[in-house]
Image: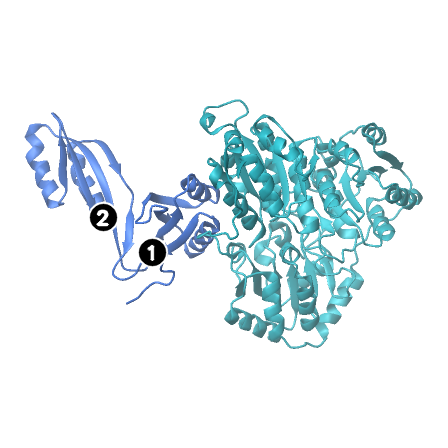
Amino acid sequence: MQLSGAEIIIKSLKEEGVEAIFGYPGGQILPFYDALYDSGLKHYLVRHEQGAAHAADGYARATGKPGVCVATSGPGATNLVTGIANAYMDSVPIIALTGQVPCGMLGKDSFQEADITGITLPITKHNYLVNDVKDLARTIKESFHIATTGRPGPVLIDLPKDVQVAKTKFKYPEDVSLKGYKPILKGNKGQIGQAAKLIGNAKRPVIYCGGGVIVSGANAELFRLAELTLSPVTTTLLGKGAFPETHPMSLGMLGMHGTKAANYAVSECDLLIAVGARFDDRVTGKIDEFAAKARVIHIDVDPAEIGKNVKVDVPIVGDVKKVLAQLNEKLEQQLSGEWQDKIAQWKEKHPLSYGANGKLKPQFIIEQIYEVTRGDAIIVTEVGQNQMWAAQYYKYTRPRTFISSGGLGTMGYGLPAAIGAQVGCPDSVVIDIAGDGSIQMNIQELATAVHYNIPVIVVILNNNFLGMVRQWQEIFYDRRYSYTEITGPDFVKLAEAYGAVGLRVTEPNEVKPALKKAIEAKRPVLIDFVVEREENVFPMVPPGGAIHKMLGG
Amino acid sequence: MRHILAVLVENNPGVLTRVAGLFSRRGYNIDSLTVGRTENSNISRMTIVVSGDDLVLEQVTKQLHKLIDVIKINDITSEQYVDRELVLIKVGADPTVRGEIMQIVDIFRARIVDIGRKTLIIECTGDEDKISAVIESLIPFGIKELVRTGKVAMLRGQKFTSINDNKEDDN
């Protein structure tokens, strides 16, 4: 039987087990939407295409399954760009489907034409412009394979309208054959032996783990490694949840806003075991002084990450879960000693802290969220101070419970990503921790949440400032607050106008009752927390500084 | 140091853009890049000459490998290889100097491929030094136009850059 391109797309998505699509229709994607209409696939109409890309991203991070977003050609496609770049930087598997002008109109500056494969070339793992309906099923098969294997990432498929209409016989391919794409998954035995030797000889090991541990589902193997080696574990922002932060050997996050214990430990260690992390500048600070006393083992699925920023003594390319399992077999149980005592002392002496003064502090709100949810919620963040406090003052114990824009640092990510996460995990409490600046970048997605009754809770830490930028201006620009004071709307009224529940909290004792009320509401809730205006995120490593030299805290 | 990379790629639209874009985006310097079909019509071969130290080269190679369309990369710099470039030179040549030019052409085993009223087009193939020398020799006559292909290169003997031989055959 002959099927149209649009029908082939629907069938292929079903073959891939897609359950949710986030999108926005338009002229050149009409055939697809027509086939979608009675397909049984669940589609969520967002209010801006950027929201679709972030929602697909949040869905993917919360579930581990690829997220799918759809937009029309031209402006629809370009509106996805920030979301695609965001997914690329954080290695998130999303599939972006875009409508395109018919093949014969390509390159003629046609109405709503944009060269989206050209535009997204540097921000996708791969992309396709399909110009023959016969290639469609294979292209979709390859896209899902590429997006979800190796180091995951976004794949965009550009779909000219005539290709969606044209008909051909449909057969979904069973295998993918890509000559140039064969990710290395198993670690090299020799390298693993060398790593085991280094670990056996180390006196002061530290495990530095990133998002790769979560992507690979390697938290159990990581836990075992930490137990065997008695290494303290520090995570990056994206590594949160890879190792329980309630564990005595957890150091919390490292880097610019990391804990003192983590940054001291990395600076003093004689062996750094980097697992699924990429030595980002927000982690390393001054690169020459990062882990300067340590030999380095680097385990990552992406060979290009190894040796990119720091010199590595033992590189191991492979899937983190597989490599750690191989490595653990070679290790003997280490005994507790001076190093473990030292770690405990640092943790004891330098806990994260803020000046409680009876006023409503943002850090206090995060602590209360942790208590009310018993650490069992999915926390999504925007970008800025809200993000750092959410990272610092909530203890993450399970993978995929902290969802945040790390690499790109995209303001406006949180609300749509929270919607995606909630769609993927309908039984979880999903909370978007936001600032009053970033929430306004994609506030329109409240309408999406209300329309589908997706019960996300938006927590605005409202200080009437672009807080993180203001903090930098305070510290590095002599308090010259250049365009960082921001006024918002009345967020409570705005929430109500959208049909969500709006609450306002100004006193510390109102925090818990408001949170409980929000969780019990089972519908979208926005809470406007009016917090101390000039609170800072500490500790802080000045940009380019060595990470053991921290300000504040 | 200059390295010569022999790169096999899928013959897909946009593959040149992907490779060239990668170089500019990550700040690597391409000295020359040539591309053309191979014995297999689905596969093209690029010869890329790139400058950089070992660290840069390692990153270039790894980043190139991440492109889905890139099938195989060989850094042949340290191997025995043959490399050639082709140049076309249009040189000012009124009848009084033609004899002299033809002598130069003979010495370099180049060829005259077009004769105009006041110009000659000279074709020359060879390695980079030879091409530079022939250009140098023709400058006094006035070079009106010049085009060169960039380097193509191939391993000598029984070593291959081919997708069927992932391990190089050393016999």
- Residue B129, numbered circle: 2
Looking at numbered disc 1 in the image, what kind of residue is underneath it? Thr
Q: 10 Å neighbourhood of mark 2: few (<14), some, or many (≥20)?
A: few
Which residue is denoted by mark 1 in the rendering?
A: B161
At 78% from the left edge and 59% from the top edge, which residue is drawn? A350
Q: Which chain is blue?
A: B
Chain containing mark 1: B
A281 up-or-down from A110: above or below: below
Tell me the element at label 1: loop
**Image spot of residue A104 (x, y percent):** 45, 26
* Discs 2, 1: same chain: yes
**Image spot of residue A533 (x, y percent):** 81, 38
At 70% from the left edge and 33% from the top edge, which residue is drawn? A46
Give the colour chain A carries in the figure.
Answer: cyan
The answer to whether residue A122 is left or right of residue A256 is: left
Looking at numbered disc 2 in the image, what kind of residue is underneath it? Asp
Residue A385 quadrant? top right
